[in-house]
Amino acid sequence: MGRTAGQLPETTTRQLAPDPGANRLVPLLARGAAGRDTLAALALEQRWVIAADHRSFLYLAGRAAQEPRTAAWFTALAEGEASAGRLLEAFAAACGVHEERAVAYEPLPGCQAYPAYVAWLALNGSPSETMLALHANFSAWGGCCAAIAEALRRHYGFTDEACAFFDFFAGPAPELERTATAAVQAALDAGRLDEDLVHRYGHLLRAYEAMFWETLWELEVRQED
């Protein structure tokens, strides 16, 4: 018997879960040991990521027009990115990021590899498989955001407004989960879900996500030297 729509996202998320020791930056933040310049870099890199992913998700929604449930999922993601982009500004301001600094900032290649690959998926990936691979990746991202939000309050004295960007991604998204389950079921029913592709996409997303955090960790280490 094949897997059901309810089982597949959970199983895929478990199989694509990152190595718990791979992220060296979030534990630093959790201890309050990362500098504020690293926090500012996180805010500035996220400005680029959010803007790029917003456009990628809109494009994927358009490509999935023949798969209404998948299209709805990507549309909801795009709307979420737009909301997150607005929330990000309070975090950036709390980190001392002003417009002049943002304009002058040079994004780090290791941080921008992730949105670059999402853009590649928007152009070349199969929408259903891309949806499931992204869904699996978001679980790790949400956990990181929860840890960062707690650390910002406990160690850095950030307000709820300044933490709202991370709270947004850390919180549950039941409607998005329901949409994902319906989209996976539709893809299974139509026989168009290739699990090998899901894992190929998910493996690369996981690697680029790890690269994002590792790049910021290396920046922190250089600043300490």
Image (spheres, rainbow, N blue to C red):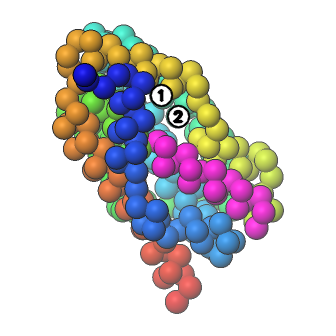
At 22% from the left edge and 44% from the top edge, which residue is drawn? Answer: 200
| Horizontal side of residue 22 vs 220, given as left or right | left
Position of residue 86 relative to residue 156, above or below, is above
| Residue 78: mark | 1
Q: Nearer the viewer, residue 141 or 104?
A: 141
The reply to whether discs 1 and 2 touch (Cβ–Cβ < 8 Å) is: yes
Q: Which residues are magenta?
A: 138-155
Q: Amino acid at mark 1?
A: Ala
Which quadrant of the view contains residue 102? bottom right
| Residue 170, image quadrant | top right
Foreground residue, 153 or 35?
A: 153
Could you tell me the amino acid type at mark 2? Glu
Q: Give the residue at x 30% y 26%.
A: 3
**Residue at (67, 72) in percent of width and height:** 31
Percent position (x, y) of residue 81? 52, 34
Asked if residue 144 is among those painted magenta in the image, a careful observer would answer: yes
Q: Quadrant of residue 18?
A: bottom left
Does residue 172 sit above or below 30 in this rendering?
above
Q: Tell which residue pokes out farthest to the bottom in this image.
A: 225
Question: Under tag 1, what secondary structure?
Answer: helix
Residue 118 rendering spot, x and y as whole percentages = 33, 41
Q: Is 130 drawn above or below residue 200 in the view shown?
A: above
Within 10 Å of the Cα at label 2, are there few (<14), some (14-19), or many (20+) other Cα atoms?
A: many
Q: Find numbered disc 2 in the image and state the secondary structure of the residue it sits on.
A: helix
The x, y position of residue 124, in whole percent, is: 20, 33
Most prominent secondary structure in the magenta stretch?
helix
Task: Check residue 81 in the rendering and tell me which mark sits there, or answer none.
Answer: 2
Q: Residue at x 20, y 16 (%)?
A: 191
Judge left or right: residue 205 versus residue 140: left
In the rendered structure, the answer to whether residue 172 lies left or right of residue 125 reads right
